Image: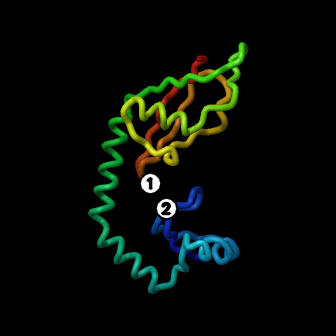
Amino acid sequence: MKIILKEDITNLGYKDDVVEVKNGYGRNYLIPQGKAVIATPSALKVLAENQRQRAHKIAKMKADAEAIAAALEGVALTIGAKTSATGTIFGSVNNIQIAEALEKAGHNIDRKLISIKGAIKEVGKYTATIKLHKEVSVEIPFEVVSE
């Protein structure tokens, strides 16, 4: 079944994307939750008109995201964590700590935009991906050190 997404959904698509999903997922979850509508011909016409009217606004949002990405290009973070004698972290480093470190560096980034592959449970160098726009993302290197 084809649906039009009303909001960004991880691993499925972005707002106003037309995607193909299984009938049960669409009818039992996405549509009742208000996250999507069925892609009827009239809904597709309305979507096309809305996108045409918002084209300049979307271009400005993308330009703003590219400016933030350019400002984040040279940033390298150091995050301190309590560790054992072997270098294993008590707990783990997550996107909240990266957002806090970015805020200390002068960049206010929402933690929901930051993604890390896997759990960080040891001291070392890693990278985090910040998805600022559906077409703009930047990778930030960071190092976890022992406090």
* Contact between labelled residues 1 and 2, with CB atoms less than 8 Å apart: yes
The correct choice, above or below, for 27 with respect to 79 in the image is: below
Q: Residue 13 at what x, y percent from top left?
A: 53, 61
**Label 2 crowding class (10 Å Cα cut-off): few <14, some 14-19, many 20+?**
some
**Label 1 crowding class (10 Å Cα cut-off): few <14, some 14-19, many 20+?**
few
The correct choice, above or below, for 5 with respect to 138 in the image is: below
Q: Nearer the viewer, residue 17 or 102?
A: 102
Task: Report the amino acid beneath label 2.
Answer: Tyr
Q: Residue 143 at what x, y percent from top left?
A: 54, 23
Badge 2 or badge 1: first in the primary sequence: 2
* Screen quadrant of the N terminus: bottom right
Residue drawn where x is 52% and y is 79% of the image: 39
* Screen quadrant of the C terminus: top right
Task: Report the amino acid beneath label 1.
Answer: Lys
Residue drawn where x is 65% and y is 78% of the image: 27
Q: Residue 53 at what x, y percent from top left?
A: 29, 72
Distance (Cα) linking label 2 and label 1: 7 Å
Determine which of the numbered discs, if any, sits on residue 14 in the image.
2
- 99 on left or right of 71: right
- The residue singled out by tag 1 in the image is 134
Quick one: which residue is furthest to the top in this view? 85
Q: Nearer the viewer, residue 55 or 29?
A: 29
Residue drawn where x is 55% and y is 39% of the image: 95
- 116 on left or right of 86: left
- SS category of the residue bearing label 1: loop
- SS category of the residue bearing label 2: loop
Q: Residue 30 at what x, y percent from top left?
A: 61, 71
The correct choice, above or below, for 115 with respect to 1 in the image is: above
